[in-house]
Image: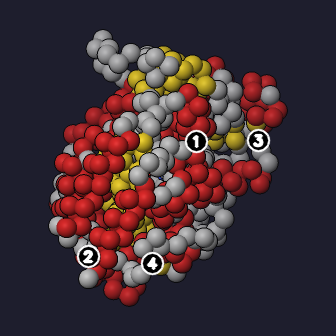
Amino acid sequence: MEKLRATSSLRRSLKSILNRQLSSVSETRYLNEKRSCQPTFNLIRDHRNLGEANPIRYRCFSSVSTVVQRNPSFSTLNPDDISYFKQLLGEKSVIQDEDRLETVNTDWMHKYKGSSKLLLQPRTTEEVAQILKYCNSRRLAVVPQGGNTGLVGGSVPVFDEVIVNLGSMNNIISFDKVSGILVCEAGCILENLISFLDNQGFIMPLDLGAKGSCQIGGNVSTNAGGLRLVRYGSLHGNVLGLEAVLANGDLLDMLGTLRKDNTGYDLKHLFIGSEGSLGIVTKVSILTPPKLSSENIAFLACRDYSSCQKLLMEAKRKLGEILSAFEFLDIQAMDLVLNHLDGVRNPLPATMHNFYVLIETTGSDESYDREKLEAFLLSSMEGGLVSDGVIAQDINQASSFWRIREGVPEALMKAGAVYKYDLSLPVEKMYDLVDDMRTRLGDLARVIGYGHLGDGNLHLNVSAAQYDDKILEQIEPYVYEWTSKHRGSISAEHGLGLMKANKIYYSKSPETVKTMGSIKKLLDPNGILNPYKVLPHSLNS
Ligand code: FAD
Ligand code: MLT
Ligand code: ZN
């Protein structure tokens, strides 16, 4: 009965999208996402010792053992430093205003908070170089900051580090319509680049819910994954070149625009995903694909996780080159979104399903793409993989489907305390962890699973009314051990930041971490760049 209903509703939808095209789907999405990046919620916070008054220990909610000592070799700011920066950058770009400092000291989740007394906003690479040269000579620690949407405590100071925000370096330098290569400054907001490219008939190979605030320099520095990685691959493939300033102020010009260049070590890769610990990225060159004319989005329900998994295998096989996103959320995630986000409704309202899958296709031939999607959906329904579903019939509907999936992080924040894990796991094992965590936590907290199923990336989130060590003890180190046992990664896309700096050994061998430490020492001998982050604290002392 359920299957019949599903089949007929999908058939209806399929019919009604004939001759329809969702070419500007993403335009509507931006508006929502921009809002979703505003931290309009308040979490209970702060049983920590912070700042200069007590610069010894830093405690955060996400990890039992994140207790950090301020590196005593770092200097503290003095009036001469401020005068130097004012002379270099001008008064307006040297910010000491308490309200503004409060914002840049606090991360998006309101979980991590530093006590920096200084925010610098350089306008040119040369200014960045002079800032770092000076900080290095004075042993002043620095946090590079983009849009401050990071989810692992990497973008805010731990103690009193100087914040260098790239937001004023937001120029597009060039765009080559023949090759699709975009060169821009690191502070360009992702959404602005998407809009710029849209006007040129191209798209960014990267798309994520924080696009209204995050900057391309931040994206590159975190090697952000996002919603389209299944189609366009990671930034290691799409970033053709970059410019970075090292801790001592030296400039590395690797801003190539070539697809092929095998002259020696490809050092740009060191900066992609190094989370501001090796240098400040100031410019980026990125390969962008042409915008294609036909885009379709289906919102589907699955009975169980095994069906989601099989659906993914089928989608890869049957949709092939037109598949551009394959996202999933479980019933608990859907419930949160429906309860906490205004104006969001379930497109499959008759009953709640255990799992929801969002599939996007993007192609260049409307009728061919439609035929493919239609055949795929019908065979999935007939095979029992899909229990209900709907295809967006216009841009607004498409946008509302995306809002559900992309709204999960915001809904989680509104629900209270959230313990956030971002794991790469074999797809067939992925949801076992969610089930295990439910058993472990019982009534203590809610366990929510969603993520980029197409990339084997699970976002495991534990939601509770407030932070509680009892909950944390049930989660860690269990989640990390589980992930390591299944040869997964404890950071699929968010990075290590402060949250997981000490956990790196769950995913990397001691020899590998040691080599990373040597590279850090070589490029930043005084350790001024984003201290306490990425690498284990034992390596930094
Ligand atoms: P920030 O948060 O400011 O900084 C992140 C890290 O990069 C820090 O360590 C910082 O020191 C460093 N950094 C920033 N700029 C520079 C620079 N120019 N040079 C050197 N280092 C720098 N992430 C994903 O991967 N996929 C997602 O789908 C995704 N969705 C998200 C959805 C929401 C609602 C939110 C809030 C976050 C999401 N994120 C996601 C996490 C975050 O948006 C990404 O990590 C993003 O790439 C961070 O960019 P940013 O400019 O905000 O960087
Ligand atoms: C997402 O995919 O929604 C982001 O990575 C953010 C999150 O994990 O909460
Ligand atoms: Zn994600």
What residue sits right under mark 3 in the picture?
95
Give the residue pinned by disc 4. 349
Distance from label 4 to label 2 (Cα)?
15 Å
The amino acid type found where label 3 is placed reads Ile
Q: Quadrant of the C terminus?
A: top left
Label 1 CB, ligand 1: below 8 Å? no
- Indicate which disc, 4 or 1, sits on the residue closer to the N terminus: 1
Among numbered discs 4 and 2, the one appearing first in the sequence:
2
Secondary element type, mark 2? helix
SS of the residue at dot 4? loop
Name which of mark 2 and mark 3 comes first in the sequence. Answer: 2
Q: Does the beta carbon at disc 3 come under 8 Å from ligand 1?
A: no
Label 2, label 1: how far apart the Cα atoms are:
39 Å
Q: Residue at the spot x=26%, y=82% of the render? A: 1
* Foreground tag (2 vs 3): 2
Q: Residues within 10 Å of mark 2 (few under 14, many from 20)?
A: some
